[in-house]
Amino acid sequence: MTATPKSAEKSSFLASIVKKQIFIPIAALLLLAIFNLIMDPSFFNITLGHNSAGDPVLSGNIISIIDYGSELAILAIGMTLVTAASRGQDISVGAAMAISGSVVLRILCGPNADAATLQAPIIVAFLISCLVAMAFGAFNGALVSIFKIQPMVATLILFTAGRSIAAWINHNKLPVVNDKTFAYFGGYIPGIPIPTPVFIAIACFIVIWLVLKFTTLGLYAQAVGINEKTSRLNGLNPAFIKFITYVILGLCVAVAAFIKVSRVSTINYSVVAKDIEMDAILAVALGGNSLSGGKFSISASILGAYVIQFLTTTLYKFNVQSDALPAYKAVVVILLVILSAPIVREKIAAFCKSLRSPVNAESKS
Amino acid sequence: MKMKKVLAMAVSTLLCGAMLTGCGSTNESSNSGSSSNSDSTTEAEKKTDAATDAEETTADKGSDDNGGGSSSGDLIKIGIINNDPNESGYRTANVNDLKATFTKENGFDASFAYSLKNEEQINYAQKFIQDEVDYLLLSAADTAGWDSVLKDAKDAGTRVILFDRTIDADESLYEASIVSDMAKEGQQAVEWLESQDLASYDIIHLQGVIGSAAQKGRSGALTETAEAKGWNILTQQTAEWNAEKAQQIVQSVIDSGKKFNVIYAENDDMAKGAVAALDRANISHGVDKDVVIIGFDCNKWALEELKKGTWNYDGQCNPFQSTYIKEVIDKLENGETLSQKTIIMDEKGFDAKTITAEDVDNYGI
């Protein structure tokens, strides 16, 4: 008799985990990890070495994943909020990153794209790029919230025009920054063996966690996403809340773009952050968030972003042709979309329960 | 309500306008797959026109210097149809080269028209034929669809010279075709690599967008020779002309602990990304170092890397076609016949050991 409540608790615990939103990305992550463990355990090796400047650096696939996944994780934060509040996605983030990155280089290198010395402190360039990206975010936000254009259509404008604007900002020149300190943000700070983007990403997570904890933004975004009319009747201003989520996404874009241009100290307008908008949306979906707005979990989206990077790195590791990568992603998306459908999840939960009950019966006898 | 409708109308008109603008000038990324040379991207030597120029130019008349000079009889009237100068650094260099050659001082009355779209280019061509230009210089966006307009040109006595790209039309419809030979570029680089006489060849091959002419030519040479000589290609991946993707691919090879001594990147951007990954792992590269770096396109900054000895070889994709075109025109004007219709340009390749400062200035794009 004593066993019954305990196992019942256990089964309900299992069921509740399955029902939890964060279950999907964690399951996907575990699946990938187990796959790699079986195929080649050396995948998880981390070694401490030195880079060409003689500074200690950690290297290994896991480090690569948390390093290269940073931009996507940062974008996933903003994309989750936008999705929750405006019930649609911003497809212009890649183009906006090109613009933002172009602004950084324009300010650092000056009008002549002469990069021998920095023309302005890096922090100034970063802050201005933040302002520019937020302005573009505000543009998208205004179209969506005030003019009530569908998010995907509204952001299509910047999606098509963005990379040209980026090229125009630098007069189509491709400035190369030779300053060593600029490369720190996409590489390593001397003496610290962990890639800087990881710290930047963690800082972003902390900021958004604090914002959600100490402001009502999360609740309001959710309320607007679930039902705009009721939230208005309850005294919220849906237009403003939608607008502000786009501005926040703009800020995320600026941070991600800053890391991106710092990685290679230059920019190529037509290919920088190409298709990243799709990955960002995928990260949100992977996080089990409904793409039609409402309830959301940012931590699940962030995990989703790292799952995508995990998958990418795994495929590189096994030398899968990288142009076949989207196909693999598609398979994952199909699986996840099916898995995240409420009906399937209920089935899984029920299945877990039924697995438990025969065990209970046995233990009782 | 009425107000709202009017507003909606106004906004949607604006939207359409904005989207059209966007469409016209942002095709660089979508085009890169099919175009032969769009991969290269660089600092341009000269200031180029803003993105919107491509839109506005129906035919902006002639060289800007001799403002007042009306077209006198002895000027050779030419119409030049090119791709959008913002498409890539290659194109920018190409357009600037043409503009510098076909000036009034050199006896030309040149009109320029830019578009990435075949239909628009055909419209421009028809307009030029109506304007009774003597020569029509054409870098076609697409290979198909030119027959009828070229027949019109022939009937009107306009002579057609193709540059940079070929078209699917009868040879009798044009006077000459001046093209880059991508296979030759690859061949030269591979021959150079062979001449280095390395003890072993363990190669990381970073490809461009699969299917583009540049990728096919440059990959083909390496694949063939590697097979013939028993070179070991560790990884053959497309980084889609993207520096950051290249960095990730090389990083994954490093993480897997495989040893390599050659990186064959099909453009400079990807070589730069690869080098960033090597620097992280403290793998030396360049002249007399552990890893041989090969890039393409001869961007100015890439040639400077060569000069510093951190890269080994850079293959050219010659954008300077105007001298060839001028030669052809001069011959035709003098009533000579051309010995061959298809003229393949000289492509240079630079070795870090022999490159000079003049080379950087003259050939860097």
Image: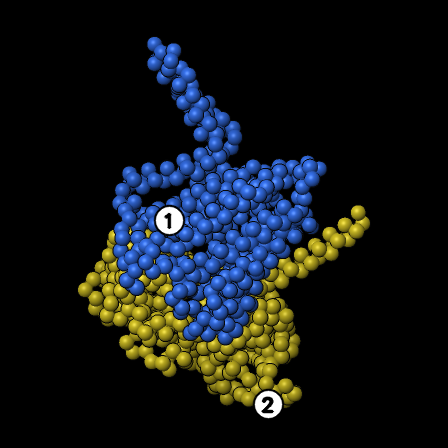
The secondary element bearing badge 1 is classed as helix
The secondary element bearing badge 2 is classed as loop
For image coordinates 27% across by 46% down, the residue present is A45
Badge 2 amino acid: Asp
Q: Quadrant of residue B280?
A: bottom left
Q: Position of residue B17 (x, y in %)?
A: 67, 60
**Is B36 left, or right, of B252 in this rendering?**
right
For image coordinates 51% across by 57% down, the residue present is A254
For image coordinates 65% across by 52% down, the residue present is A142
Residue B55 visible? The answer is yes
> Among the chains, which one is blue?
A
Which disc is residue B74 wearing?
A: 2
Above or below: residue A166 compared with residue A339? below
Q: Residue furthest right?
A: B2
Q: Position of residue A361 (x, y in %)?
A: 37, 13
Circles 1 and 2, Cβ within 8 Å, touching? The answer is no
Chain of the residue under label 1: A
Badge 1 amino acid: Ile
For image coordinates 20% across by 62% down, the residue present is B200
> Among the chains, which one is yellow?
B
The residue where tag 1 is placed is: A65
Chain of the residue under label 2: B
